[in-house]
């Protein structure tokens, strides 16, 4: 049995007593997940301010065999950063590791600590005349360490890729307190295995990311943004292919929203939608040069396409209004009631077939079901959310396993994934075991055993439960 008072005294000696939270009213914000689905009870919350302090904490946790739950901005939608209810897990909050270490505009790279928010990184890049392209609804509160740990994607993956593609180097504290120093800003390095990749998407189960070197890009000076109405999901995907052919990598964003999504937006934000069509598509091009010239090219090209309706943003204010419609979708759904949420991905070309077949299977199993489909169709990532499996949306979550089985069967039938950008956490572990390639699962177990043989890093999440 670990001597908890002695352990906590040692933690306080490392980080300062004022940065160790032990009272329930102080630890409560760290014990509840973003969606209020998982409620834990941490032993305490430690708030280190340096990599050296993190390393000392993990060494101490090894010595006392105390489990660690890394937590960034606590915006996980899968319970990936929530402690269990045992009262024996130490949450390590990273908000004080928030310094800019370096920015190199000639190399288009920036090195920041893991507790810096995504919005802060975006602002630092913009101040230097550069773009850090990751963009999420939670960017004001989510932190870079969490973005890395879930391999976050967001709104511009179509052009710039996920965090895996945006990362040049990492600094990671391993479970035994050793520090992996790989904050390289190189684009090319073939000197052995790229071990930083192990920690991107691992959700804090293999080590604790303390800093990262990230790619920057030229800051676009021109935007052309349009909300378009099309007759079907197939018409939307055909439009995506045509846009890629016409504009190449200037196509930055391609978002879709079903008619049901538009109806919800119109209900809670009346007068904001310019039209309601079977599918709405938000398209954005970005480039250097002048916005007016880029907008004119888009208008001329759209005149040759079969578009049912559409509006083009002629100013930054109009552009932001169009974006707000897409960004309000999650909040609008929340206002309308509970739903069973899926963050799934299929190849973009498979989206129409997936929607037709999955919609049909759900409606057969649950007459009257409501399906909300929207998201990043340009990279195949859909938010596919289900409600009203029963009248008045009663006892929705009693149907969750049945709904998930239908959705995930269709996802994998279409060569997809059950976690496209939000991670797995403690929500989807059992489904990962069911659908993931068994050889890949065994490799993951082996890596976990080598790096964390005592199972102290973020236990209870998907990697520690594989094979249970």
Image (cartoon, rainbow, N blue to C red):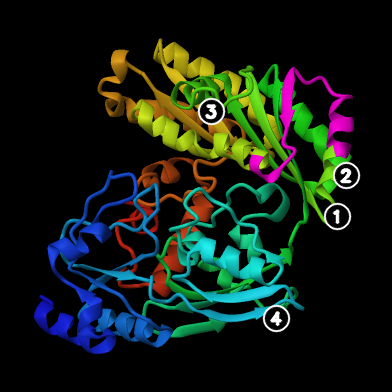
| Side of 371 where 158 appears, left or right | right
Q: Residue at x 52, y 53 (%)?
A: 439
| Distance (Cα) linking label 3 and label 4 | 44 Å
User: Does label 4 or label 1 sit earlier along the sequence?
Assistant: 4
Element type at mark 3: strand
- Name which residue lies at 27% across and 26% down: 398
Label number found at residue 293: 2
Does the rendering let one see residue 245?
no
The magenta stretch is 296-317
Residue position for label 3: 373
Numbered tag placed on residue 424 in the rendering: none
Q: Residues within 10 Å of mark 4 (few under 14, many from 20)?
A: few
User: In front: 437, or 457?
Assistant: 457
Distance (Cα) linking label 2 and label 1 = 8 Å
Q: Residue at x 22, y 80 (%)?
A: 18
Badge 2 or badge 3: first in the primary sequence: 2
């Amino acid at each position: 049995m670990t001597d908890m008072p002695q352990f906590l005294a040692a933690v306080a000696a490392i980080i300062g007593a004022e940065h160790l939270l032990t009272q329930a009213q102080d630890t409560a914000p760290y014990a509840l997940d973003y969606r209020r689905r998982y409620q834990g009870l941490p032993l305490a919350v430690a708030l280190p301010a340096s990599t050296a302090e993190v390393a000392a904490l993990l060494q101490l946790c090894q010595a006392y065999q105390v489990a660690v739950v890394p937590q960034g901005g606590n915006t996980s939608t899968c319970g990936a950063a929530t402690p269990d209810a045992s009262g024996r897990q130490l949450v390590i909050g990273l908000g004080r590791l928030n310094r800019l270490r370096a920015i190199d505009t000639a190399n288009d790279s920036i090195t920041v600590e893991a507790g810096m928010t995504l919005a802060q990184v975006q602002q630092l890049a913009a101040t230097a005349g550069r773009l850090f392209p990751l963009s999420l609804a939670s960017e004001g509160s989510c932190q870079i360490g969490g973005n890395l740990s879930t391999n976050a994607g967001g709104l511009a993956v179509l052009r710039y890729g996920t965090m895996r593609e945006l990362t040049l180097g990492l600094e990671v504290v391993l479970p035994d307190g050793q520090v992996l120093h790989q904050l390289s800003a190189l684009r090319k390095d073939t000197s052995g295995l790229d071990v930083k990749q192990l920690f991107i998407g691992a959700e804090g189960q293999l080590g604790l990311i303390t800093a990262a070197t990230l790619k920057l890009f030229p800051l676009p000076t021109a935007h052309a943004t349009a909300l378009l109405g099309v007759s079907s999901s197939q018409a939307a995907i055909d439009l995506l292919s045509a846009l890629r052919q016409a504009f190449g990598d200037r196509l930055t964003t391609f978002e879709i929203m079903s008619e049901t999504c538009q109806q919800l937006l119109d209900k809670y934000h009346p007068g904001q939608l310019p039209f309601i069509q079977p599918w709405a598509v938000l398209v954005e091009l970005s480039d250097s040069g002048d916005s007016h010239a880029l907008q004119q090219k888009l208008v001329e090209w759209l005149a040759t396409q079969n578009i049912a309706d559409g509006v083009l943003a002629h100013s930054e204010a109009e552009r932001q209004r169009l974006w707000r419609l897409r960004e309000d979708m999650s909040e609008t759904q929340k206002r309308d009631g509970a739903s069973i949420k899926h963050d799934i991905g299929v190849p973009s070309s498979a989206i129409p077939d997936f929607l037709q077949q999955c919609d049909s299977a759900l409606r057969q199993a649950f007459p009257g079901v409501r399906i909300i489909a929207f998201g990043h169709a340009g990279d195949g990532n859909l938010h596919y959310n289900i409600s009203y499996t029963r009248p008045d949306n009663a006892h929705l979550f009693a149907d969750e396993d049945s709904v998930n089985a239908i959705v995930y069967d269709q996802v994998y039938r279409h060569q997809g994934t059950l976690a496209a950008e939000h991670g797995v956490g403690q929500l989807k572990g059992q489904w990962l075991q069911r659908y993931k390639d068994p050889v890949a699962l065994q490799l993951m177990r082996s890596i976990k055993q080598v790096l964390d043989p005592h199972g102290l890093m973020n236990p209870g999440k998907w990697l520690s439960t594989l094979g249970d």
